[in-house]
Image (spheres, rainbow, N blue to C red):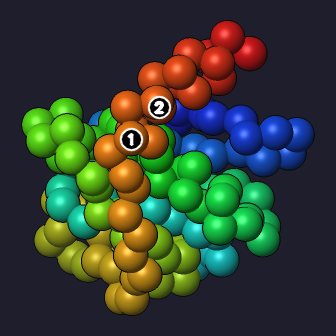
Amino acid sequence: MKFREIFLGKNKRILLGKDRHSNDELMKEFEGKSNIILHTETPGSPFGVIDFQKPTKKDIYFCGIFVARFSQNWRENKQDVKINVFTGKDIAKIRGMEIGTWKVKKAKRITIKKRDLLNADILIKKNDAK
């Protein structure tokens, strides 16, 4: 399954699900791994996986911008978006859960600011041009 790919630089890739099916496949691929994963606090966003080790706080925030930008929360509210940050070791698929839904055992929370989301389209266009 194809995921949305965003490159932050050489050997720095972020993967984003495109729908609930690709979200599920993405989480299956990274379940149990130490990669940082992001998702909005509310349902209706892509899972974002930082596909490199030891990301900086800036890398994590930047990934959060993309996760938030493609979320229903942003599309409907145009306000700051709260993002949960966790690892593949903190997720589990429990029998009976819907496609694209995963249990998160523990997560930290960051807030992506509205001003950064308003500028996200510029970042997306620059990335798509590469």
Image height of 27 relative to 19, above or below: below
Q: Mark 2 belongs to which amino acid?
A: Ala
Residue 55 drawn at (x, y percent): 73, 65
Q: Disc 1 and disc 2: Cα gap in Å?
A: 9 Å
Is 17 displayed left or right of 130 in the figure? left
User: Relative to 41, is 18 on the left or the right?
Assistant: right
Query: Which type of secondary structure does the marked residue at label 1 adopt?
Result: helix
Disc 2 element: helix
Q: Decide if residue 91 is in sight here.
A: no
Identity of the residue drawn at 82% across and 39% down: 9
Q: Which residue is drawn at 53% across and 21% down?
A: 122
Residue at the image point whose x is 34% and y is 36% from the top: 70
List the single residue furthest toward the top: 129
CB under 8 Å between discs 1 and 2: no
Q: Residue 120 carries which label?
A: 2
Residue 33 drawn above or below residue 70:
below
Which residue, given by chain and number where applicable, does mark 1 sit on?
115
- Left or right, residue 4 beside residue 59: left
* Residue situated in front as seen by the camera: 56 or 113: 113
Of 100 and 85, the residue lying toward us: 85
Q: In which quarter of the image is residue 35?
A: bottom right
Q: Nearer the viewer, residue 119 or 6?
A: 119
Viewer-side label of 1, 2: 1
Percent coordinates x, y for residue 72 in the rendering: 19, 41
Which image quarter: residue 105? bottom left
Amino acid type for the residue under numbered disc 1: Arg
* Extreme-right residue of the structure: 10
Q: Looking at this view, is 89 or 109 the one in front?
A: 109
Does any portion of residue 10 appear in the rendered image?
yes
The quadrant of the image that shows the C terminus is top right
Determine the residue positioned at 15% across, 71% down.
96
Residue farthest toward the bottom in the current orientation of the protein: 106
